[in-house]
Amino acid sequence: MTLAVTWSGTLSAEEGSSTGRPDWTCVVVGFSSGYVRFYTESGVLLLAQLLHEDPVLQLKCRTYEIPRHSGVTEQHEELSILYPAALVTIDGFSLFQSLRACRNQVARAAAAGSDVIQPPPLAYKKWGLQDMDTITDHSSIGITTLSVFDQMKNASMLGGFHTSVKGSPPAMSQYITVGGGPYTGFYYAIEGSSQPLLSHVALAVASKLTSALFSAASGWLGWKSKNEEESVQKQKPKVEPATALPVRFGLPDSRRHGESICLSPCNTMAGVTDDFGRVTLLDVARGIAIRMWKGYRDAQLGWVQVSEARGERDLATSPSMPRRHAQFLVIYAPRRGILEVWGTQHGPRVGAFTVGKHCRLLYAGHRLMGVNSVTSQGWQIHTQQVCLFDPVNGALRAVTIPFHLALSDKKSERAKDMHLLRRVTTLLRSLLESEAQSVLLDIKHPAIKKQALESLLSNKNAPVSCLTNVTRALLASLKEQDPEAVDKSLLQFCSSELKLLQLYTDVQLLHYLVDLILQRYTEMNSRPCVSFAQDSSGPLPVRTFLSQLEWVNGELRVIKQPDTDWTQLGSFLFWGCLSGQSPLQRVCETLQESGISPQQLLSLLLSVWLNKEKDVLKYPDAVSHLGTLLSTLSSMKGAVDESWDGQCVSPWWQQVRTACVQSESSAAALLAALVAHRVAKNAITRLGESKFQEEWECVSLELEQWVVCIKQLEDVLALQTLLCLPSPQGSTGGAVTRCSVKTLLESGRGGVADCVSKLIFRQGVSPDLLRDILQRRGENDICVCVCVVLELLECVCQRFPNSLSPDVLFAHCSWENVVQWNKDPEVKTINNLKMISNPHIQFGVSAMMWQTFIVKRFSAAAFLMEKVGKAPKDRLCRRDVGMGDAAVRSFLGSSVQLLQALMEADSAVEQVSAPDVCVEEVWGGAEGPVSIVELALDQRSVHYPLVQHHCVLASLLHAAMTFSLRLKPLSLFDSKGKNAFFRDLSSIQLLPSGDMDHNLVTVRQEVSHSATLSIGGRTNGVKHSSTEDMWPSVCMELSSILQVNTDILRRHLVCELYNQGLDLRAEEVMMEVQDKDVLGSQLLVLTGQRLAFSLLHSQSQTKPNMELLARLPPTLCTWLKAMDPSELRCPSVPLSQSSRLINKVIEMLPENHGQYSLALHLLEAVDSLHEEP
């Protein structure tokens, strides 16, 4: 417990409010005239009220306190004003709102210079206190509710034996007064017995703000003018009468006169001073005096409430339990110059301080007004409960009391130990060894002493010498005590921890001797360079060393935890030996003497070897050092079972193989396996020489296990080398895959192909190049990066001939492409399906791709185009399909190819037998997820017409997106066709059959015509791609399936090609037209448009052309003038092509045709025009 100076000096202005600090201060002053005035901290009058025409004796405030638990009644804020025979209580909420409104009005008046502002009235209750001679002080307890027993007792005492009792106890406001006759009085006002009164404002803001400020200042200074007093008397408001409130009971003492009363923070006790120099402690609920102190004349009282500090263990076991609180009564006796602290209710004096005789004990008994259950969340108290002000030096001292002083004598010793434990924690931060040791030895309870030692050992900054000295001193003190009284668990804990500290010191010393020489050598011979502190791996902290080792039944064991990394501990023990910096034999002897089992030492050695692969590969001699360590550890007692004969698997060497096959450090694992294989083989050879004759060759199951393990590790090393290739810049596909023998065995039969397919996708290897790699062929003019991929991939394929067969790898690559496309549809993927030669695998992969990834987006695209009636824009595509319009066009083209591949594979399945999925012999134990190829082979057969049905829709969608056609694709099918879409391809659906509805055929024909025109419009005379060249045939095939007359479409296509001036391509399509007569009539018009353009609409009309036009027959001339050459897309066509075209027309038209003679005249005109120079 302390009495410390919290403030000394001069007051400064408030910088601003924060949580738990006041926004502004209001000073309440009671006057002998009965007025109660409210001022700001600067002296500005806010409100004045005349509540009673007697002098004001006491002003007390009760503010909101956070309930400690649910059983405590929440108390409301209240301001109580004591008069000689009356008590006025003002509701805190009403007062707070009124004062805040007055303060705002005063601020506005100061800014605007306005006149009188009427503040709101106050709601208050006024009680006339009866049956008490004199009253000097009071305390408002708040709202209380009696128990049922107390209610029946009071009713019987007041009303007699036959009185009636209400069902529920009423809520009452309790008041306690002190004075004379009786010495203490207890008053109870039932809630609702008196209605709140509304006050009349006696003096508010004055007519001018300056006069209000002057009035307030005069009130502060204690003088007023006569005129002001007379004006106030004239303005004296009406005073409401008081409601009579009789005393319920009291403590009668005719000679004793109470002077003051001080209520405890929890409202359960109160301290009363009297003129006899006594301090009486009252039980507020029972109304009795429970304790009295003598010799405290003119005493000043205060209360301190202390909460129990809760540790982490308490929060873990009972987080919802409320904290305990202790009440301490502070008594200041000015005549004796002493400040005492007493524990309540019957506690001893826990502290006393000698202070001055002219001090003042400051105890407000309240906190901030305006706080409620909502605003108190996260509220921090910034006010002292009890302070002592010394006017001599101007110092303000605060009393700080620890909670354990309130405990009983039996628990006080334990509480002291807990205090010492916290003291030890504080000292550890400053690394004060001697003081921490002294405090640790002063702790009495063994459990707390052990907890303190654990805190000391877990300190990350404590040096090992400090830990050793403190632990040794504690162990020595325990041995000096009576063996029967010493806690055995604490003694064993100290002994084991001291052994661990000694082992840590010995190993560190062995490394330090060599490290010191190397460090000095390096300092003398190295050049200055830049180094970073975080890059240097420091020594193992002693607390980490102690946390990973424990003594169990006299044996030192490494603690096995799921999240424990043994690399750091293994590096501390073995890295010096592996790097050749520590004496290997002495380290092994020290570890053998420590008591750690050889199996755990082997685990630590393998952990550091496998997890520090990069460092291991830097030291060429590390492999030989590892062999020496393995030989030394295997020769320890308990390492290899003495009954092992080599014909069974040794648990010792199986531990090495298990660690190697589980490690992702492929190179380090293979080196460790090779070294361990050599050591094991030497041991088996020595064992065979001792048991068998020399001419017999020793055959061991153990060596067979090593052969399989090394073969697997070699395969994994080749695969991991391939997977570590850096990805090209801008490629996608995820991070580099890390693998081990265990992960490959657990990934099933497709694990290797899955890893390689991910790498192929990242590298962007084309299917043709991959096929060459799989066939062991490579090109010499490829770039260096691809050459590295080629070399490593050929090596891996040679090691995995079955797991990476062409069909298996292409199947996995196809699946990986569609998986990556599904993640980012904007990424351009490669179609590997066509590279799969086996139709069973191709069929299964295609069906899975369609059902898993394609059909959802495909249906979204179809419904979107059906909704908008045309090729959708980019924004709509991204909203509904999840990709841009260009990506949708490519996606629909890939969907057509996928469905075509599915139909081709389904047709060829019956001709080829299903392949067998097999792996290499050493990987025969692979178990895990079913591979892609196995899933593909298990796919059910599809309904071929349904696949074709979807392929037609996909072709329509692709054509609409390519040529920006206006169509509703689903409307081109009847109800059966619509219902069959997007169903499972293996299900049997009702499809359209027979003749279609005429209206539907008409719509299809219009769409086909527009598609044909668009195809012809895209042709512009340049060299076309294979995709554009296929569109005419695709359009004709779709028209045939949609029951549209293809001959009409071919005629339209021929006319469109001639319209574009592509006569040669038009002649190719013309050969497939059946109805030559109609085509001839259509081409005759087109020929007339060409000739009309040359004779009538050409910019370079010549005189011969005009003469030729004059020589033409009138019928022909009139017909040419009726032609519109603007309909031609390419009107400027050589006359030789027009002559060839009219010859074709004459060949197609029969001689009896009505336009045959017109065609002959056109031929003569074209030939004449062609012969002109």
Image (cartoon, grey):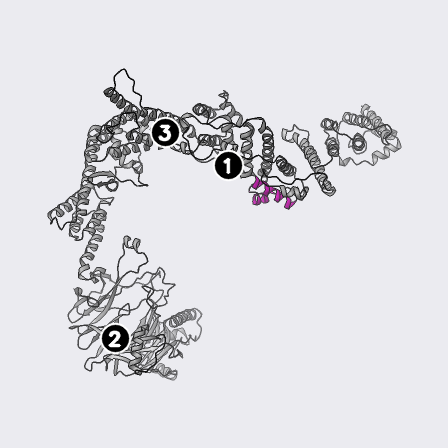
Residues shaded magenta: 855-882
Q: Is residue 106 above or below residue 766?
A: below
Q: Secondary structure at mark 1?
A: helix
Q: Secondary structure at mark 3?
A: helix
Q: Amino acid at mark 2?
A: Gly
Q: Is residue 803 left or right of residue 514?
A: right
- Asked if residue 858 lies in the magenta stretch, the reply is yes
Q: Is any part of residue 512 visible from this angle?
A: no
Residue 666 numbered mark, or none: 3
N-term mark: 1 or 3: 3
Q: Is residue 1045 left or right of residue 1?
A: right
Q: Is any part of residue 592 visible from this angle?
A: yes
Q: Position of residue 155 (x, y in %)?
A: 31, 80
Residue drawn at (44%, 33%), measured in percent from left and top?
Answer: 748
- Asked if residue 604 lies in the magenta stretch, the reply is no
Q: Amino acid at mark 3?
A: Ser
N-term mark: 3 or 2: 2
Q: Is residue 494 above or below residue 420?
A: above
Q: Residues within 10 Å of mark 3 (few under 14, many from 20)?
A: many
Q: Nearer the viewer, residue 193 or 751?
A: 751
Q: Amino acid at mark 1?
A: Val
Which residue in the protein does label 2 denote? 287
Whole-number angstrom distance, CA of label 2 to CA of label 1: 82 Å
Q: Quadrant of residue 253?
A: bottom left
Q: Position of residue 1151 (x, y in %)?
A: 86, 27
Q: Residues within 10 Å of mark 1 (few under 14, many from 20)?
A: some
Which residue in the protein does label 1 denote? 819
User: Magenta part mainly helix, strand or loop?
Assistant: helix
